[in-house]
Image: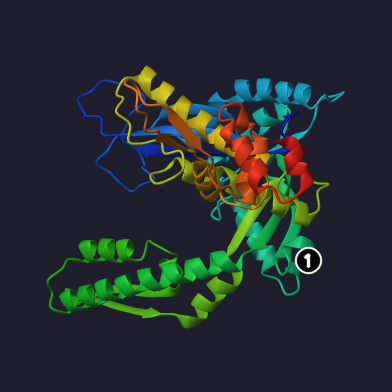
Amino acid sequence: MRRFQLSADVLAFDTTNFDTHIATTTDGELARRGHAKSKRSDLRVVGLAALVSETGHVPLLHRVYPGNGSDQAVLASCLAALGKLHAALDDAQQRGGAGCRTLVRDGGAWSEQLELDLDVEGYSTLISLPLSHRASVVALAHAAKRGTMKRVGGPLGEVRAARLRIAVGELNRTLVVVESEELLRGQKRGIAVALSKAKKELRKLERQAARGRIQREELESRVQKALQREHLSEFVVATVKERGGKTSLHWQVDAARRRTLERTRLGRRVLCTDRHIWSTGRIIHAFRGQWNVEELFRRAKKGGVVPWGPSHQWADGSLRLHTFATVIGLMLVGLARVAQGGDKSARSMMQMLGGIEATMVQVMAPARGRRPTVLLAPELTAEQRKAVRTFDLGRWLPILISSMAQSAPNPSLGQVA
């Protein structure tokens, strides 16, 4: 914390899981069949929960858990460790009193009791409530009123939001309804795809009903299944009737309901926090820090800079150690990115560091015996020279120092050499 000047006042918490290829008959508590992020239903998965700093994408706490565990249960099991981390961070930042930290998480980890437990451990909370939650319904109705959604301004630009303070169960909370154009566009694309598939299914069911080839119970079940995704049931009106022993299906897309859905619900999130004194912009900015932990997980997925898999472990202890090594790798990449500075992605930075290499040449010698070798200095870019100084690479490969001296465009680099 002190060396890399990491900000830990806002911490992002999230969970993910990784596919394993462990046989079903192999004993173990960690590898379980659950809701796999990869959409694979034929593999056992191992879960990973991580708490990430606001800057640097550096993991400060992690927990390995069975693949069929829930977000609420995992976070509840981390409460004792969260309390110790809170005290350790206060000590690292040399604070006179206890600091107030905010834990950011998505709606999958909502629980009224969990909110109270986090408060006991010294954490404020910021969470995205599920839109089906009663408080979210009230907040969305409030935001739908004319003139309620206002531009936040400042660094957030054209983002619009509405704010109110209500009771969420027994808790006093500030709710912020945020409008996201990117989320709205993504949801519209999803609705268009789902609606196209639903129309094909409804036309098929309509023909079957007209020919008397389907029973009413089955027809209602299949219609409900066809409309259960992407808010289709909100604006696709389907009616099943039975007259004279004959079942019929009539359906239509209600354009007015669809426009109302897009205006009042789509593209919106409901943020819930006990940080009542924070500005609306600060609340939104803090929640966007959730992207930090999602970015961390992308680095650990297949094709990332620190991939978790493929794993050839099957015992629980080995899986825990394997995951711990992955988290250490993620931490080192995050700290290296902080130390190097700049806006380069983690992948670009690692490729740049991987390009710092010297060439070993074997010299022809007339005498017998092992031929001597000579290291040829590489040509370094300005960014690579900065990395050599930052990470003191000349200590392990002195030829890099001479390379920097030869290509140094100013006296300061010559003094370093």
Residue underneath mark 1: 153
Question: Residue 414: x, y in percent?
Answer: 73, 41
Is residue 361 positioned above or below 30 on the image? Answer: below
Residue found 21% across the figure and 29% down from its top: 23
Outermost right residue: 96
Residue found 47% across the figure and 82% down from its top: 255
In the rendered image, which quarter contains the N terminus?
Answer: top right
Would you say 67 lies left or right of 332 here? left
Q: Is residue 175 visible?
A: no
Question: Residue 245: x, y in percent?
Answer: 16, 73
> Between 4 and 364, which is closer to the camera in this rendering?
364
Is residue 176 positioned above or below 335 on the image? Answer: below
Q: Quadrant of residue 397?
A: top right
Q: Quadrant of residue 239?
A: bottom left
Q: Residues within 10 Å of mark 1 (few under 14, many from 20)?
A: few
Q: Secondary structure at mark 1?
A: loop
Residue found 73% across the figure and 21% down from its top: 87
> Between 380 and 327, which is closer to the camera in this rendering?
380
Residue found 63% across the figure and 36% down from its top: 401
Disc 1 marks which amino acid?
Gly
